Image: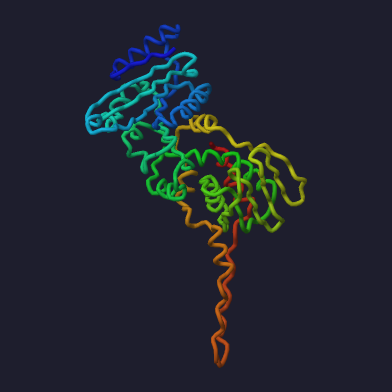
């Protein structure tokens, strides 16, 4: 059932919601949260479709906020709110309200959304595109306990990750981080099967994919080893290669669907590692509303500490320092310092495996 309201108010929208529930014979409200989607007209359809599919697992009231661009100075000074109320089969298992804001009311979207929030229920804000640099300080983000962005939709993903690290507030998360949950679980399980010391890691994936950087940062932070970021033609993440003193451990996914796990001394195993739809990612994020401490630690690690393709090439081509000419006698060598003892990989894996599947 759809109810269209033109030049309306939040009070009239609430009345339309009650009217719609009574018309379809479900006057009770059985929803568990409010999902606020802030997007534009171009991406509204895909975002709403993903939210409706996720509502089958998490019945929710979905508020889609679309800020319409005014084309003339006169329109920019005229405030108007149009709404489309959907209940029943048109709104998944919850309720949907599409809000289109015009004029000055665009700068006060929180005053429109606040009366429509479900009472005594958590609020999740999601920006499919054009997320603010500091979601917690955004007027709509301030209403939410959980704030979801997507660095994959940013024009410069690395710069976006750096901005997220500088403005991180407990409750922030990123769908690029959610995409690597199966990879983290699989890698932690693989390291639990061996008693070896990891010496280096290489993460391979397509360019401009922040999930690759986040996975590399997670491995570098948890294993405390150098991690190299290399490029491939995709799709998405394609391989993780870990060098250990017992032989390589490789998780390779060339086609974006089926991966092969190779561990030294064991037969290769095929594992399902399909690229997931946005609806599955949102459904996973809605399962937990507490702060993600692992994501926060990865952001603090920093993208600039990874070894990229350009860094590796520069280090390889760098000339060796020339010996000093006319040196009468070799300088006395300083006594060698004992090498720092690294933690075994299994210990590091146990440290990470307990948190790898937390999401």
Q: How many marks?
A: 0
Residue 294 in percent (x, y) is at: 50, 44
**Image quadrant where residue 171 sits:** top left
Residue 252 in percent (x, y) is at: 67, 46
**Residue in the image at 56% along x and 93% along y:** 328
Which residue is at the front of the view, 116 or 336?
Answer: 116
Residue 150 in percent (x, y) is at: 46, 39
Which residue is at the front of the view, 171 or 125?
Answer: 125
Up the image or down, 282 lies above or below 161; here it is above
Up the image or down, 323 lies above or below 97; here it is below
Colouring of the image: rainbow
Up the image or down, 179 lies above or below 66; here it is below
Q: Is residue 90 left or right of residue 143?
A: right
Quarter of the image where the N terminus is located: top left
Q: Is residue 307 left or right of residue 145?
A: right
Which residue is at the front of the view, 302 or 119?
Answer: 302
**Residue in the image at 37% along x and 39% along y:** 135
Residue 113 in percent (x, y) is at: 33, 25
**Residue in the image at 48% along x and 53% along y:** 303
């Amino acid at each position: 059932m759809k109810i269209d309201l033109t030049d309306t108010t939040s009070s009239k929208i609430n009345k339309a919601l009650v009217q719609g529930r009574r018309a379809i014979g479900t006057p009770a409200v059985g929803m568990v949260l409010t999902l606020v989607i802030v997007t534009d007209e171009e991406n509204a359809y895909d975002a709403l479709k993903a939210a409706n599919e996720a509502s089958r697992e998490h019945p929710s009231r979905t508020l889609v906020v679309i800020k319409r661009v005014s084309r003339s100075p006169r329109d920019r000074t005229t405030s108007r709110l149009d709404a489309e109320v959907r209940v029943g089969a048109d709104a998944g298992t919850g309720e949907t309200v599409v809000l289109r804001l015009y004029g000055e009311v665009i700068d006060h979207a929180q005053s429109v959304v606040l009366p429509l929030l479900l009472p005594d229920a958590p609020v999740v804000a999601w920006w499919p595109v054009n997320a603010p640099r500091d979601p917690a300080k955004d007027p709509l983000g301030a209403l939410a306990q959980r704030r979801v962005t997507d660095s994959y939709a940013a024009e410069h993903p690395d710069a976006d990750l750096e901005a997220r690290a500088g403005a991180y507030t407990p409750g922030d998360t990123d769908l690029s981080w959610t995409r690597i949950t199966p990879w983290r679980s699989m890698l932690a399980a693989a390291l639990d099967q061996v008693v070896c010391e990891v010496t280096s890691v290489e993460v391979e994936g397509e360019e401009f994919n922040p999930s690759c950087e986040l996975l590399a940062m997670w491995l570098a932070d948890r294993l405390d080893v150098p991690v190299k970021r290399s490029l491939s033609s995709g799709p998405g993440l394609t391989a993780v290669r870990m060098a250990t003193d017992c032989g390589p451990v490789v998780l390779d996914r060339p086609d974006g669907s089926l991966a092969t796990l190779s561990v030294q001394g064991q037969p290769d195993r095929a594992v399902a590692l399909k690229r997931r739809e946005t609806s599955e990612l949102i459904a996973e994020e809605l399962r937990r509303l507490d702060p993600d401490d692992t994501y926060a630690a990865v952001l603090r690690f920093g993208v600039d500490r990874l070894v990229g393709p350009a860094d590796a090439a520069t280090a390889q081509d760098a000339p060796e320092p020339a010996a000093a000419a006319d040196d009468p006698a070799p300088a006395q060598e300083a006594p060698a310092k004992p090498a720092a003892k690294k933690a075994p990989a299994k210990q590091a894996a146990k440290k990470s495996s307990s948190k790898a599947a937390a999401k």
